[in-house]
Image: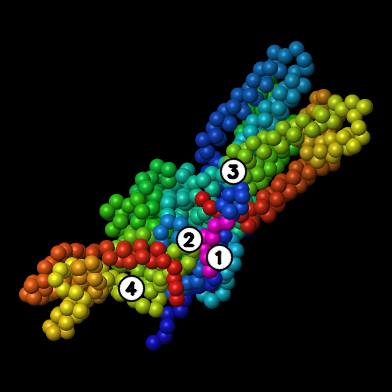
Amino acid sequence: MRTIIAVALETFLRLRRDKIFMPALLIGLGLLALTGLASFWGVEEFFKILYDLGTTAYLFTGAAVAIFWGNKIVSDSKTEGSLEVQLASPIGRSVWLVGKFLGLSAALLLLGVCFLIAWQGIYFSYGMSWMNPFDLKLFGVLTISWLFLAALSMMFATFATQAVALFCTIWVFVCGLISAPILQTLSPETPESTRKVVEVVAGIWNINMFNISQSVSKYHLPVAPDDIGMRIGYGFLLCGFFLGVACVAFQRKDIIA
Amino acid sequence: MVATPAILEIKNLKKVYDRDLFKKKQVVVNDLSCSFLEGQCTALMGHNGAGKTTTIRMIFGLITPDAGEIHFRGRPLTLEDKRSIGYMPETNKLPTNLTCEEILRHHLRVFRPKHLKPNEYAAAIEEKLKEIQLWEHRHKRVGKLSKGMGRRLSWAQATIHKPELIVLDEPMSGLDPMGYRLMVELINKLRREKVTIILCTHELWSIEQLCDQVHIMNHGKVVYSTLDTKIEKVKEEASHILTVSGANIDDIKKLQSGTNLPMWLNLEAKSHLTQISCRSYADSLNWMEACMQHGLLIVEFQKLSNLSEERLIQFFGEEKTA
């Protein structure tokens, strides 16, 4: 356990100093600020625009950073050779991967906290009070999607080159975004077998299910606590699955820097 | 006399790489067996592609062998055993955006050496950074260090947990004369402390000065080892060659037996010339004087300071027959 913490601390420290951290933070904050302005000037309902744009900005900024960092922490370790030195020390490969993931999660949570502070800033700038608990749930569930995307990116980075891994991760991410909309747009003439396949894919891999603001703002459906718990649980299950595959793939891979 | 036990034993190690899409196989390490004796400095030599680095990576579990065993203190090497092993790779393979101090602290957290409590880490880091003359640069990030400083930091990382066995892969590469001297001093310090060292190097000078044993690798196996002989024998052959005209091998033999001239290391006929390989400069002077006294013409006098190098090239070109 102490080794995992040591690896996680090292990873967190490195990511906090990473060149992408500040630009990602500034872009995220900028997008959230624009969200505030767009909702103020928008013709539609203030909160609908605020939540729709805000959650989209939060999801995409965080997802981009999670995918990039997930790829980077494995690929950079390979290219700079620090992976060789680290695995030559008494660190098991799975321990190394899990430690890296925890460090990355901590860095993403730090980014999320910064965005939440900006979100609260929007509330204050429009003369409102503290954000309500729903906002915390909303961004919490969205943050889970960052984590499993980071795990997905790490998984590909363990057995593919940096460019290939990045390409595959982005492709799978896009699949997760469009699977549910594709299912909704299927015509009644669609063959049953095709419909079944799309249903299974959309059921397993649907990133939109982690954006609960859509349920509220689009369909005016309150989100039950059990439902949130299920989404969080499923997010962690995905993290575990991707990390598990990564550990198995990484276990017997030759480290040739 | 009690024989020195082997701290690390490699038995019938084999690694085959699938090189390309068509699965053309390349045997990188082929039935390699060798031992590294406790408290001794052993050189692992070989030309590029001989399989040294692959062997080292297999020792550390970075590459999975296709066959064979690696034993540490008489039993298969485990993850826990790695706590007693240090590794300094050929190039600086350190995280570029961490400081010297942070790298060593992380290393100690991972190794958790028995001789140190967590609250003593700071003192150990200070001592080590002072030893390698990087204390003033402790807050500098690795990316900002010069290559030589990076080498020294790699050294610190490999030794701060006081390993029983340390693997140094080309530790002198990229060092300026001052850094080189410091590295030699540091290695000698480890030798005095009876730490087992595996030194991968191409530099004969380093081997002569620092190593007790030598394993020479070629085509993935050990083709020469000093474990049954002494390294001085290799050094002894670094000598001079006298090429004379007007005498064949028998004449030279008669000349030697009739006088108290020193024995040659090698006697070889080259066309109408005869080459006398001498052990030392003094021997070659004696031979030169004797040849001149007997009216032999000295065609060439060659100082072979790199005879060992030639011998190594011979090893690299031939397979072990024994």
On whether disc 2 and disc 4 are found on a single subunit, the reply is yes
Instruction: Read off the residue under disc 3.
Output: A161
SS for callout 1: strand
Please tell me how crowded label 1 is: few (under 14), some (14-19), or many (20+) other residues with Cα within 10 Å: many
Looking at numbered disc 4 in the image, what kind of residue is underneath it?
A: Ile
Residue B86 % position (x, y): 46, 62
Instruction: Read off the residue under disc 1.
Output: B14
Residue B97 % position (x, y): 47, 43
Could you give the CA–CA distance between mark 4 and mark 1, rounded to whole angstroms? 27 Å
Q: Residue furthest bottom?
A: B1
Instruction: Read off the residue under disc 4.
Output: B231
User: Is residue B138 toward the left or the right of residue A59 in the image?
Assistant: left
Choose between A159 and A3: the one closer to the eye: A159
SS for callout 2: loop
- Residue visible at 27% across and 54% down? B178
Choose between A23 and B253: the one closer to the eye: B253
User: Is residue A2 shown above or below A132?
Assistant: below
Looking at numbered disc 1 in the image, what kind of residue is underneath it?
A: Lys
Q: Magenta part of the protein: which range?
A: B25-31
